[in-house]
Image (cartoon, coloured by chain):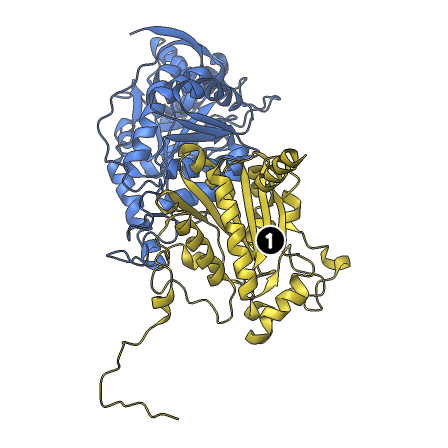
Amino acid sequence: MSIVDTSLPPSRPARLVDDFSPSLILPGAHKLCAGCGEPAAMRSVVEIIDELGLTNRAVGVFGIGCYTAFSPGMDVEVLQALHGRAPSLATGLKRARPNTIVFTVQGDGDMVNEGLQEVIHTAARGEDVTCIMLNNGVFGETGGHMTATTVIGQRTKNSLEGRSAKKHGYPIRMAEMLAPLEGVAYVARGATNNAGNVFRTRKMLESAFRAQDQGLGFSMVEILTMCPTGWFIATGDAPDYLTDKMASYHKIGVIKDVAADAQANAEELTQG
Amino acid sequence: MTKRLLEGSEALAHAMVAAGCRFFTGYPMTPFTEVLEGMARLLPDVGGSCVNAESELEAIGMAWGAAAAGTRTATGSVGQGLSLMQESLAELSFARVPMVVLNMARGQGDYFQATRGGGHGDYRHIVLAPADLAEAVLLIQQAFHLADLFRNPVMFMGDYYLAHVIEAVDITSADLGTLPAKDWALDGSSSGTGAAKIVSSIMPTKRNAPVYVKYGTYLETGGAKIAALEKGMAPLHEQGWCDDADYVVVAYGTPARIIRYVVGKLRAEGLRVGFFRPITLWPFPAEALRAATRQAAEIGVYELNAGQMIEDVRLSVRDRDAVGIGGISFDDSGFGIAPELTPARVAARIRQAMACLVVEAAA
């Protein structure tokens, strides 16, 4: 074991978490819990916007949840919405300024509980906006309460014995609910519980923003995120909990991709 | 100056387009419906956009988004639909997003809703209530100007009469002076520059702003914002025959037009009666009303509700009696038209009230 020589200044300055953050995330952006899956999702969103060269056209419309910490914490224009209403604000903004790239950031409580009709109508109208839903299956900001996506059996502060279908009804699979609407160009569900899923989620975000940029219609990426605090489990157990409990019901994958389908059809025709 | 014969709603739509409104959205509901129809017809021709909202919640949300992009925007409904919009109407004030909200009221039962607001927190909206179409087409243009000037929603209060009466009106774009550039408006261009903009009801600045304003600090500025609005907006009113009046009738909106006519008739008969009409329901023209009624023994408030504006009248005059002489409309259509507004009935109520005055004076 080598002994660090402290009589001299360090060969390079100490590096903090902000030194590893993408340029579009401002220093001190959030104080979210350790093990939270939302920062990785937010990071993926801004990195993809940057990589696609869409930054100076991007406006984020934020809902209300833990992730709202990023509303003043990103170097991206932000329109703050009320709980549940972000898709309508995104609609008005995009219609008024068609050249913008507009995305919403909402949680499962925001999109599926409070604002279900807003997102459905926005999707049905085929608005060229991208809705991003961070789904952790609980109201994280209030301290772990049941949402419309909470899986059967999950314990929350207001479903102490675990969510029961008889007592609380069934969870909504949001991405699958939107996919059949004709106005929808792209729908996928990713997750941030391991490097592989983050990589897949980044690809999904890329496809969604491309669909918007090409004016193909509404796009939506649901991202499963860990909430060890709201799930009342050890931080280290959260990634596996997501795989076992959440992703077994809310399945990860691309659900609808109009552009890819069109390309596949074209290739089939060429080959035929 | 060219006058055109137009139905009220259509004239309002033309006036909004003349004012530069380029985004409109709404949900059909009488008597707001025809304004929506007018905007759907007119906006595409001027490069604007009119979106059919699936409910009033979507309507106010879409208007919010378009207004945040710096576009002159309006939406509206009637009292019931505006009840659904209250959360956003409050929050739009905190977020400092300007827009015009049409309140095409059924009767006059929504005075409290318009002037006090049904939303949360400390906020106020300027409320403009015209009595006829000529005034309406000017006031609605002024509403856009005031919204932009104060970065606050402005409410335009119409009703069934205003929406449906056909009158000859001149709609020319009113020159209301210059306004500061909307350098706060969003278009994505400041993203990635190190100074990205934010339009928010809870976080007015980004974390890296030269002065980072926290939520509590921002909430605290609410009082100062209301004071600035009240100080910056001179209340508007109309008055007639008040100088020597023993009795002054206060009324607003299109009903006031009928009441003004009746008061004029009674004057011609020799009754010492005056007329006062607030045009801005907020800020209420309190000082003007106090001055106009200084010599009056009593004030009659003719409104089609159980007594709402009368509270503002009482706050204005304080030391004088104000008595409600209107009442809730018993019109079965629910739109609050007639029969309280037949001139004979209005005249009878005023005569009755003034007869009591004489009795009191004798006693």
Residue B276 can be seen in this image:
no
Height in image: A92 above or below A42? Answer: above
Label 1 sits on a secondary structure element that is: strand
Q: Colour of chain B?
A: blue
Question: Residue reaching furthest right?
Answer: A166
Which chain's residue wears label 1? A
Height in image: B285 above or below B134? Answer: below
Say whether residue A188 is left or right of residue B305: right
Tell me the crowding category of disc 1: few under 14, some 14 to 19, or many 20 or more residues within 10 angstroms, Cα based. Answer: many
Q: Nearer the viewer, residue B143 or A260?
A: A260
Pick the quarter of the image with the C terminus of chain B: top left
Say whether residue B284 is left or right of residue B34: left
Q: Nearer the viewer, residue B9 or A8?
A: A8
Q: Which chain is the one coloured yellow?
A: A
Give the image location of residue A35, x and y in percent: 51, 70
Q: Which residue is mark 1?
A: A189
Give the image location of residue B255, x and y in percent: 44, 20
Residue B51 can be seen in this image:
yes
